[in-house]
Amino acid sequence: MTMTLKRLLILSIVSLGACQTVAPVNDSASETQAQNNVLVNSTEVFAVVNAQVNAVDLEHKAAEWGYTLKSKEKLDGLDMYVMTFHCPPGINPYDAVVELERLQPNSTVSVNHKYSLQLETFEQNLSSSDYADTLIKWPKSGCPARLPIGIIDGGVSDQFLKKYADRITFKSFIKGTPSPAAVEHGNAIASILVDPNRLSQGEYYIASVVAEGKNGEQYSGVYPMLKALNWMVENDVKLVNVSLAGPKNRTLQKAIERASDRGMIVVAAVGNNGENAVPQYPAAFENVIAATAVNNDGEIYPSAVRGEHVDFAAPGVRVHIPGQGGGRYVSGTSIAAPFVTATIASHAQNDGAWSVADVKSYLSQSSKDLGPNGVDPIYGHGLISAKENCSF
């Protein structure tokens, strides 16, 4: 029997099994072929395993089935091996996910999704008030950051790094230099968190993960995000801001679960795909704090994704970002996320050992309910507040 016929026979058996009442071995079907337009590379897949013996076994079995191992790396902080495979001719990456997990049941395999920056506009010279801190009752004297903060984003400018050199550790996880658009986005996110008038005494780890595609699109693949998370864990960073969003990816989910097991809290933007969009990730993962955006009247940002996973709302519409020429006004759920992160970092009861459940409990006590009474899929627990969280 040829390898092609053998593969077709086994895939047919797997497909038949999925039609029965018994659940399939994995939920890789969630990485649907309808998402082909959000793949970095349609000929490769990622696998993560927790033991070297499983990595060796998968490498050997994958080679027998025509896969080419492009890279294998141990991520010590997450205690997992990451393996990149090139698919055999004629095998799409979604079938490859099923096949490789069948070959090594202890592996988690996924396609290489894109994760995009969630800031839709850079509005110049806009007539608007600087309302953000007032809306969430942030003290004018600032708040102390009670633990190191990680930022996984597009990177920051040399000028920004020089200005805050004593507070920032920076590392790039992409080839080459980030694009001006990625740096501009990263500067906006970092300026909210690093500004000593908002968070004092803070220590920051900034990871550049966003590259520019051939068509000018700005995105991160799965691998840079895995590497960035691992770097954060290795440096004992317990709070990480991610203003990127994209499809559900089980390899990324596994990495975040491992980071969460090691005490990391991840805050992520819910995404700007609109009220009828499917949930975006990593915000929609169960162990991530999902941040949505509101304007100065507490009204939801029209482009914000809705869903039961939404946790908290924060300023994210026409928010002023300081800079040359008087700065600029920006909008997007990207901007809301760092306000939530800053509130968590400054909470007086945060001893660095919080769980996701702790964050939701403490922040919900001071949040302002918006929309329908109680927790809802538009505003979550409501608008965050720093009034009673930050105390010296």
Image: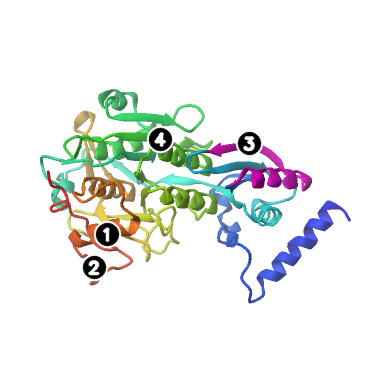
Is 209 left or right of 4, judged from the image as shown?
Answer: left
Which kind of residue does numbered mark 2 sit on?
Answer: Gly
Q: Residue at x 27, y 50 (%)?
A: 340
Which kind of residue does numbered mark 1 sit on?
Answer: Ile
Query: What label sits on residue 71 in the rendered view?
Result: 3
Residue identified by numbered label 4: 207
Give neighbour class at mark 2: few <14, some 14-19, many 20+ (Cα, 10 Å).
some
Is 152 left or right of 135, judged from the image as shown?
Answer: right
Q: Residue at x 29, y 59 (%)?
A: 360
| Percent coordinates x, y for residue 189 in the rendering | 31, 40
Secondary structure under the numbered disc 3 in the rendered image: strand
| Percent coordinates x, y for residue 5 in the rendering | 83, 57
Which kind of residue does numbered mark 4 sit on?
Answer: Ala
Residue identified by numbered label 1: 300
> Which quadrant is the C terminus positioned in?
top left
For marks 2 and 4 on the same chain, the one whose residue lies earlier in the sequence = 4
| Percent coordinates x, y for residue 173 in the rendering | 48, 33
Which kind of residue does numbered mark 3 sit on?
Answer: Ser
For marks 2 and 1 on the same chain, the one whose residue lies earlier in the sequence = 1
Residue identified by numbered label 2: 371
Magenta range is: 51-75
Is 34 left or right of 168, judged from the image as shown?
Answer: right
> Which quadrant is the N terminus positioned in?
bottom right
The verdict on residue 343 being magenta is no
Q: Nearer the viewer, mark 3 or mark 1?
A: 3
Q: Are marks 2 and 1 in contact (CB under 8 Å)?
A: yes
Give neighbour class at mark 4: few <14, some 14-19, many 20+ (Cα, 10 Å).
many
Q: Are marks 2 and 4 in contact (CB under 8 Å)?
A: no
Q: Are marks 1 and 4 in contact (CB under 8 Å)?
A: no
Q: Residue at x 25, y 25 (%)?
A: 163
